[in-house]
Image (spheres, helix red, strand yellow):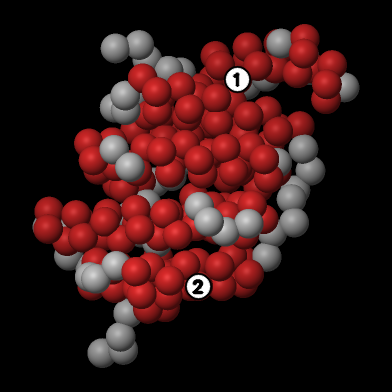
């Protein structure tokens, strides 16, 4: 199985004349520190363009529709999971060729635009509201959605239930306008389903 390595792909993308001329940036690749790129993943994500973040969402959406791939992907969105670039790399390595290619392209675009860009407008409160609305819609569409979303167990059945609810939320988000999808994606990549689950869980 071919391993997709994000950092070399990033270097190739930065070196590509088409991208460099289109963005009108000259980047000295000798000064690019791959370790720094990986360690500042959250800052790269914050600066990444809306289009690149939405491409990443689309990659997640497609992978979530494949049962075997969705199980690996769902682990990234557990509330306590690491969601840095290295964690995504490990997950991407387990996916099929089509999904690996989508994620490789999406990661490259996120990294390039994140390294070159300025911090994007991001309102966590609005992102939270988008996710809450998506959770309400998913509750109306899918029996057992809320049970899975609020599951806190670490056993396999609980993880599967959370994974099913995650796929259902993603499926609802695909029909939202791009700005809302991007806000929700930025939140999910930082926080997982923590907020949605905490907000919807009955008080005990």
Q: In which quadrant of the rendered image does the C terminus lie?
A: bottom left
Q: Is residue 72 visible?
A: no
Instruction: Tell me, for residue 161, which label it has, or none.
Output: none
Q: Residue 169: give x, y in percent of width and height.
A: 40, 60
Q: How dense is the environment of label 1, judged by Cα within 10 Å: few (below 14), some, or many (20 and up)?
A: many
Instruction: Point out residue 22 in the picture as x, y percentages from the top left corner.
Output: 83, 21
Per the image, the residue denoted by label 2 is 133
State left or right for residue 72 relative to residue 109: left
Q: Is residue 123 visible?
A: yes
Place of residue 57 in the rendered image (x, y in percent of width and height, measured from the top left): 51, 44
The answer to whether residue 39 is above or below residue 152 is above
Q: Quadrant of residue 195?
A: bottom left
Give the left or right position of residue 42, taking residue 5 as reference.
right
Observer-nearest residue: 30 or 91? Answer: 91
Total number of numbered discs in the rendering:
2
* Residue at 57 percent of width and 59 percent of height: 176
Res. 10 mark: 1
Compared to residue 35, the image places residue 152 above or below, namely: below
Quadrant in the picture for residue 24: top right
Q: Residue extending furthest right?
A: 24
Describe residue 46's horizontal placement relative to residue 69 as left or right.
right
> Distance of mark 2 from mark 1, alpha carbons?
35 Å
Task: Answer left or right for 82 relative to 161.
Answer: right
Residue at point 24%, 66% (across, down): 148
- Decide which of 78, 42 is in the foreground and name it: 78
Q: List x then y, in percent, for residue 90.
A: 35, 29
- For label 2, the crowd category at 10 Å Cα-Cα, with few meaning under 14, some 14 to 19 and many 20 or more, is some
Image vertical order of residue 20 relative to residue 189, above or below: above
In this rendering, the answer to whether 15 lies above or below 67 is: above
SS type, badge 1: helix
Q: Quadrant of the N terminus?
A: top left
């Amino acid at each position: 199985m071919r391993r997709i390595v994000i950092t070399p792909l990033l270097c190739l993308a930065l070196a590509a004349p088409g991208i460099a001329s289109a963005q009108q940036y000259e980047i000295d690749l000798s000064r690019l520190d791959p370790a720094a790129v990986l360690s500042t993943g959250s800052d790269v994500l914050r600066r990444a363009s809306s289009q690149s973040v939405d491409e990443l969402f689309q990659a997640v959406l497609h992978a979530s529709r494949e049962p075997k791939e969705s199980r690996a992907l769902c682990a990234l969105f557990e509330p306590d999971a690491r969601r840095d670039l290295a964690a995504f790399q490990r997950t991407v390595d387990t996916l099929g060729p089509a999904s690996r290619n989508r994620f490789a392209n999406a990661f490259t675009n996120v990294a390039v635009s994140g390294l070159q860009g300025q911090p994007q407008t991001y309102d966590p409160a609005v992102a939270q509201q988008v996710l809450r609305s998506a959770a309400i819609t998913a509750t109306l569409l899918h029996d057992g959605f809320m049970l899975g979303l609020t599951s806190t167990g670490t056993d396999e059945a609980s993880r599967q239930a959370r994974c099913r609810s995650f796929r259902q939320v993603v499926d609802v988000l695909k029909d939202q306008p791009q700005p809302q999808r991007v806000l929700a994606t930025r939140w999910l990549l930082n926080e997982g389903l923590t907020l949605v689950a905490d907000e919807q869980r009955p008080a005990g």
